[in-house]
Amino acid sequence: MRVRRCSARSNHFDIGSPFLRYRPLTSLPLEYRILSRFSPGKEQMMTHQSFLGSESPTFLPGYFPEFVKPLELPSSSDLHRGIAILLSICQLIQYLWKVVAFSECQKSLVRTMTDGKSEAFQGWVSWLENGLFLLPLVGLLWQPCRSSGEAGSKPNIVLIIVDDLGIGDLGCYGNDTIRTPNIDRLAKQGVRLTQHISAASMCTPSRAAILTGRYPVRSGMASNNDKRVLVSLDVSGGLPRNETTFAALLKKQGYSTGLIGKWHQGLNCRTHNDHCHHPIHYGFQSYYGMPFTLISPCWPDTSRDTELAFEGRLWLCMQLLLIALVTLVFMKLKGWLHSPWLLILSIATFGFLLALSWYSSYTSSLYWDCILMKNQEITEQPMKGERAGLIMLKEAVSFLQRNREGPFLLFFSFLHVHVPLPTTKEFLGVSQHGLYGDNVEEMDSLLGKLVDAIDANGLGNNTLILFTSDHGGHLEARNGHIQMGGWNGIYKGGKGMGGWEGGIRVPAIARWLGVLPAGTVINQLTSSMDFYPTMAALGGGTVPKDRVIDGRDLMPLLRGDIQHSDHEFLFHYCGTYLHAARWQPKNSAAVWKVHYVTPIFQPKGAGACYDTIFCACFGENVTHHDPPLLFDLSKDPSESQPLSRESEPLYDSVIRTVGEALKRHRRSLTPVPQVLSEQNEYSAWRKPCCGLFPFCLCDKEDGHSMAQGDGDKSA
């Protein structure tokens, strides 16, 4: 039997027949992988040799005939659907007929059918025997139409965001000491972006920009004071409800939408359970994860197990003590008890002090901010940080299996690699870079399993995977002299620095098998805000027309339809303060970066703000530059040599052009309440609680099983 591969980039095989080829069995959904009874213990499908002379069926282990695959119907119109059904039926008849083609049995059957029959009947049998050879030609003519319909159908979208990951932490971006094989594989299979810019250098505003496709200053998710992120779950602020997220757009287009992982866009407004800023109000039909962000108290917590075991008994003791106290007072007043009031007062004082001392331990953020939720139910308070990643992965795999018929949107938001870097024992000590490196390698492993689950469910060819970090690595995150934050490669600065490249240039990879050219590297200017219009276009929706959308559709650039980015200018904010802007002229290879404000590093001569943990956006700890600093990033990506009028003939022209663009940008801004400045105050009434306050300890994750259904889809 002559078997050859159809093309160098294909896993299909043909066997010399113009109308039959074999696809890998592993490309089928699991329910179609049938164990052949003809070869017990081996997963294979019965196939047939070339019909041009084969006399008996044979096997091609691990492959199945192309035209007996599960029926794929284009969704564009009823006419296409009917034609597809007709062709599939004809192909099935053709297959059954040709299995016995040219055999003595078939010839005898034809003679029996035609003997003594009318010429019309004999002609019909002759057409059935010979005319079926024309069906493959019809199929070939139909195939481009069907392929076009498939390509035009709505793809699944998986957005993966890592927390605080530096661009220099990954192998595919030049790191040769931290092992990230799964992210590197994703880059080889897709498109890697080298000038991908986050809209902010802190968690809350950068994620708001991704969700809305807008600069955070437009939505109010920026700050004019030192509180540059939502500082707790008991603040009233959150992403404004009048903002339309990409999840809301895709939900309207029939997508199943889910968010797994970090949210950090608010939770409650007035009470501990009103959930006014819960993800379900922003287009996500299901949610599992951490509504806040990892903070130092979240891990490790050696006392937690003891407290959980003691919590139930303590609540029972408090109830019994209260009942006893009320009973004693009642009996004393009735004259049934002759014990002195001093004894009763002592019991009451003991109970009060016990409750007060127990409650004082709750001042730690561990109990109020380090929680996990499933939809609107708190499942773990406080959470076990080291196992959260594995549970999130299980939830993600479950989501894929439930929604593999598509289309779906999965936003997988890692808790990794934010301090305090909770890591499972399996990955402790495996890297060359301490706990941070261990956490990065664990994240890479989890991501690899997620991508494997996408491919194992047969979703790879119809799923766009987008991977990025929310902003640059945190240089000031240290434990003594041990680095606990990420590395930003050659780029100056890091997390919290609104203008320097290390705080806002992030890794970004896009993979869509068969659609995006594998192994491509794009050096054009792109933004994290671009995900929004990209998803809208792929999902068949339109971006809102009543507001400015700052992102641009990435697909023409990713596919190679255009060679130049749609972005000409990008503006870089630190809170509400504009620190820098960049310009990539369409007729030049230069990338100009203009700095108006830069932070003052401490101690003097350092490369970050180690004295204050985060660099300031305003005040005495920043420098205002007049004239501005100018860099050409195409020649000086590390921003080490500022240009001047003497060294750069275009200095005045560039400063003037960027200044005019900045004026146009500022005219496009509409004043809105700044959430992080005005709605970022603590309140005990908004503290989430999974039980009867203040007895809020709970752990519903032991024996965790994968979810069987989505959350409130009516939201």
Image (cartoon, rainbow, N blue to C red):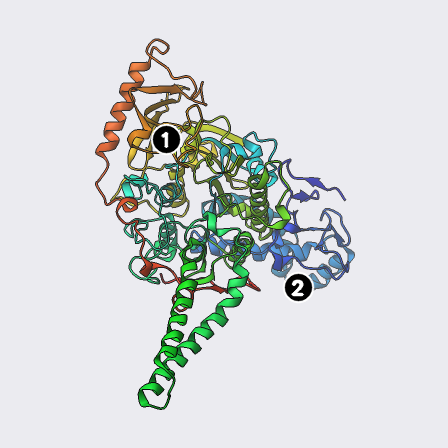
Residue at image position (70%, 40%) is: 4
Q: Between residues 312 and 149, which one lies in front from this camera angle?
A: 312
Whether residue 122 is situated above or below residue 156 in the rendered picture = below
Quadrant that contains the C terminus: bottom left
Quadrant that contains the N terminus: top right
Q: Which of the two marks, 1 or 2, is nearer to us in this view?
A: 1
Query: Can you give x and y, in whole percent of width and height, for residue 617 in the image?
Result: 32, 33
Dot 2 amino acid type: Lys
Q: Between residues 63 and 613, which one lies in front from this camera angle?
A: 613
Query: Can you give x and y, in whole percent of width and height, for residue 513 in the image?
Result: 55, 41
- Crowding at dot 1, Cα within 10 Å, few <14 / some 14-19 / many 20+, comes out as some
Location of residue 712 by image quarter: bottom left
Which residue in the structure is indicated by mark 2?
Answer: 117
Query: Can you give x and y, in whole percent of width and height, for residue 619 in the image?
Result: 28, 31
Residue sitting at the far top: 646
Report helix, strand or loop for mark 1.
Answer: loop
